[in-house]
Image (cartoon, grey):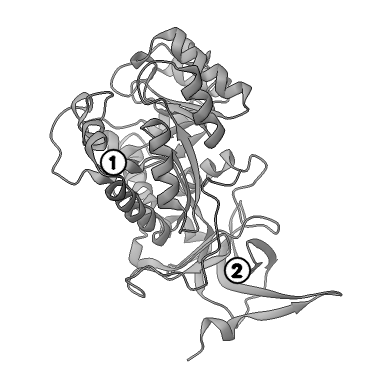
Amino acid sequence: MRTASTRRTFKRDSTIARLVERVSGWFYDGRRFREGTVGWEDDVLVEVRSRRSRETLAQGLVVPGLWNAHTHLGDAIVTQELKGTIEELVAPPYGLKHRVLAKAKDAAVIAAMRRAMATMLRTGTTGFSDFREGGLRGLKLLYAALVALPLRGLALGRPSGLTYDRREVAAILRVSDGIAVSSYIDWPSDDIEKLAGDARREKKIFAIHCSERVREDLDEVLQLKPAFLVHMVQATDADLVRCADAAVPIVVCPRSNAFFGMTPDIPRMFGAGVELWLGTDNAMINVPSILREMEFAYRVARMKGGVPAREIVEMALRGKRLGDPSGGLGIRVGARADLVVFDLPGGANGFASLMRATASDVRLVVSGGRAWPPIGFDARLRPTSRPRRRRLRPAR
């Protein structure tokens, strides 16, 4: 039996010997699935060719690492059965999750977030954007959970309360990727405008939930110049057109919405010209598996007329543009080595296959060049290579 080390090959140039690792099968190039081989060195894709290689780490349906565009990972600390409305469970400052997080010990929150991150990794997600509650403490806990895992995490912090404190906001922006808040209607208008303005001046991300439980004034929200909005379940057709005209993407979280008796109209959103991303939302409500979210989104969309499977797959890839605005959706030389190999049929049916994908179909996950085994092969979730040292904040 070959080991991973025997499948690695050295590719020499004029000065150094380089370690290139490969997978092969049907890979997504940004337009369609092509048969061939993909190779990477360290954390960069260096080889994309049409011929299959025999010496590979895995073979199957190969897609770029999936991106979870909206998470609340701290919620994973809440393990009880959930009952109540949106306001009672998640609304600040007295929703259930906020009460639990305020009382929880740091070590318990870190362990819960790390379990959620491990679930994302082994189900094909290699990056995520987290709305981090709890001010500086919340960010510290997120980084502590992330430090040992080869995930890309965009940490979007927020003040510890619902008021603007210039010093606190400045400190949050120094150590985070931006600011993300619950909802426009939760904040005094002057304070939320200061938050957004501070984020823009620091060239950081500003994001916000919008029109989830009630319709909000979209003109007021768009004046904040958000990088993206989350939910928009209660949006009107005119609201969606305004988002499309302003080039503001919307992250939809169908399983979270369904938990509270709502469903996003995905075909209507696409019809308005909106760019859609996909997220799993609260970890206390949903396992943060984008595979589950893709399947559910596809089914929910069918209830409203349907969208092609390819659109759903690309919703699970577009969120990575936050960290790499120039990056494409497909596998290409020069991109970060984030890949998922599925034990699924490829060819023209590759997108349809992914609508039925489960965790057990994952053969291999590669995140930042580090290969992780799928579920069942190593219950301890140990990486196949020595962990690299990470800074205590996501790389920009």
Q: Is disc 2 in contact with disc 1, using a CB cutoff of under 8 Å? A: no
Crowding at mark 2 (Cα within 10 Å: few <14, some 14-19, many 20+) = some
Relative to 355, is 89 above or below?
above
Residue at label 1? 75
Look at 34% across and 70% down and name the residue there.
Answer: 380
Residue at screen point 66% across, 55% down: 335
Furthest residue to the right?
A: 14
- Residue 358, above or below 98: below
Counting the numbered discs, the total is 2
Label 2 belongs to which residue?
35
Disc 2 is placed on an element classified as strand
For the point 62% across and 43% down, the residue is 324
Dot 1, how many residues are within 10 Å of its Cα: few (below 14), some (14-19), or many (20+)?
many
* Position of residue 286 in the picture relative to residue 252 (left or right): left
45 displayed left or right of 145:
right
Residue 117 spot, x, y in % from top left: 38, 53
In this rendered view, identify the residue nearer to me: 262 or 363.
363
Instruction: Give 354 or 8, whichever is nearer the viewer.
Output: 8
Q: Quadrant of residue 187?
A: top left
Q: Is residue 278 visible?
A: no
Answer above or below: position of 127 versus 14: above
Per the image, label 1 sits on a secondary structure element best described as helix
Instruction: Give the x, y percent position of residue 136.
Output: 43, 34
Q: Which quadrant is home to the C terminus? A: top right
Question: Amino acid type of disc 1?
Answer: Asp
Distance between the alpha carbons at the discs numbered 2 and 1: 41 Å
Percent across and percent down for residue 154 are 50, 41
